[in-house]
């Protein structure tokens, strides 16, 4: 649950065997992982190496997640642009797509951390944290006692607030968790409105530096009931969200571990550097019950993009359009290599 800033970005364009030769270029930008050699993993693989705050593996079995009432037309694929269910406002100013891509929900920061159960949002010590929607405070305080655990380990979030929300069309509640808070300004049982102050940013618990850890839990307030917050947070003006599920010809998800393989998201007009993402490293993170995605990227400027992967022994590319304020869902079944 660590927010990391890095200043290295490289622009990598994969050349396709049928169209040309491999071209490599490099550039610098806010945050972009190192280019990755093409080697897919058909099952999640990740290894943890020591960091300032290493995270233990979860001993808790995942609960069965409830299925929400659909809020948009199901995607018949392979690419659909849908309204999504963006019911939450950002509790702190939203970061850019490159920041979100570095340690995404379900990711391992390229094998260096445990699978992420939320998003780490950049913010300064003491910055206000605002309620993303109206709801009831169901937890407020330290998570350092057995009766107050919000994760399998005590003092994981340091100080946290959990809100319970109900939304039209959803038969079960949505919980939002805010971790590593320095101060808390609400109490259990209190009703809050969207935009109300609930606390301030800190670095308590398992954290390296101040930031806000945000989780979305669907149906129950448990560690394994998490969903990708990017599928719930309203995109900023002019921004979009893209979610994908990439499978082999038999329909089995292909996992890209972020160290030896990745999903490349490349602006079609080459206006900015590509972003490289791993898919959900923990198979228990099954994705949104409606979309069943294996990764998502938010705060992506609207426009045309090329999705590129190397899998099954050859490169693949798919073109998509991301519209402002909308969710682009990609169900991409790769064809066998020639």
Image (spheres, helix red, strand yellow):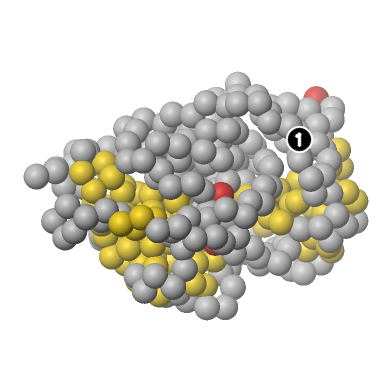
Q: Quadrant of residue 168?
A: bottom right
Image position, residue 65 (x, y; %): 50, 40
- Look at the picture and state if 55 lies above or below 313: above
Residue drawn at 80 percent across, 25 percent down = 146
Q: Quadrant of residue 269?
A: bottom left
Residue drawn at 78 percent across, 63 percent down = 130
In terms of depth relative to the viewer, which is nearer, 79 or 308? 308
In terms of depth relative to the viewer, which is nearer, 272 or 214? 272
Image position, residue 297 (x, y; %): 48, 57
In the rendered picture of this protein, how many numbered marks are placed on residues? 1
**Quarter of the N terminus within the rendering:** top right
Q: Quadrant of residue 38?
A: top left
Confirm whether residue 95 shows in the render. Answer: yes
Residue furthest top in the image: 59
Asked if residue 20 lies left or right of residue 139, the reply is left
Image position, residue 155 (x, y; %): 80, 32
Image position, residue 54 (x, y; %): 68, 28
- Look at the picture and state if 322 lies above or below 208: below
Residue furthest left in the image: 338
Q: Residues within 10 Å of mark 1 (few under 14, many from 20)?
A: many
Q: Secondary structure at mark 1?
A: loop
Asked if residue 275 lies left or right of residue 38, the reply is right
In terms of depth relative to the viewer, which is nearer, 48 or 140? 48
**Quarter of the C terminus within the rendering:** top left
Disc 1: which residue: 206
- Look at the picture and state if 27 lies above or below 257: below
Residue drawn at 59 percent across, 73 percent down = 236
Confirm whether residue 86 shows in the render. Answer: no
Residue drawn at 34 percent across, 70 percent down = 268
């Amino acid at each position: 649950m660590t927010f990391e800033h890095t200043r290295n970005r490289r622009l990598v364009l994969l050349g396709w065997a049928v169209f040309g030769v491999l071209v490599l270029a490099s550039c610098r930008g806010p945050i972009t992982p190192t280019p990755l050699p093409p080697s897919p993993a058909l099952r999640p693989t990740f290894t943890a190496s020591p960091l300032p705050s290493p995270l233990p593996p979860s001993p808790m079995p995942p609960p069965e997640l409830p299925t929400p009432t659909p809020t948009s037309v199901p995607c018949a694929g392979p690419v659909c642009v849908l309204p999504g269910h963006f019911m939450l406002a950002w509790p702190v100013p939203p970061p850019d797509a490159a920041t979100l891509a570095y340690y995404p929900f379900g990711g391992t920061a390229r094998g260096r951390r445990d699978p992420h159960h939320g998003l780490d949002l950049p913010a300064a010590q003491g910055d206000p944290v605002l309620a993303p929607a109206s709801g009831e405070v169901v937890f407020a305080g330290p998570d350092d006692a057995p009766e107050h655990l919000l994760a399998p380990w005590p003092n994981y979030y340091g100080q946290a607030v959990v809100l319970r929300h109900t939304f039209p069309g959803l038969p079960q509640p949505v919980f939002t968790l805010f971790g590593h808070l320095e101060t808390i300004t609400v109490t259990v049982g209190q009703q809050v409105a969207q935009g109300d102050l609930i606390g301030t940013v800190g670095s308590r618990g398992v954290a390296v530096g101040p930031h806000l850890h945000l989780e979305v839990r669907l149906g129950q307030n448990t560690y394994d009931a998490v969903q990708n917050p990017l599928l719930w947070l309203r995109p900023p003006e002019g921004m979009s969200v893209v979610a994908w599920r990439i499978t082999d010809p038999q329909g089995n998800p292909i996992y890209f571990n972020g160290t030896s393989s990745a999903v490349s998201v490349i602006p079609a007009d080459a206006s900015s550097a590509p972003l490289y993402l791993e898919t959900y490293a923990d198979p228990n993170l099954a994705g949104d019950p409606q979309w069943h995605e294996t990764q998502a990227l938010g705060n992506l400027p609207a426009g045309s993009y090329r999705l590129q992967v190397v899998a099954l022994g050859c490169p693949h590319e798919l073109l998509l359009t991301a519209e402002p304020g909308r969710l682009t869902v990609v169900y991409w079944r790769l064809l066998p290599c020639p």
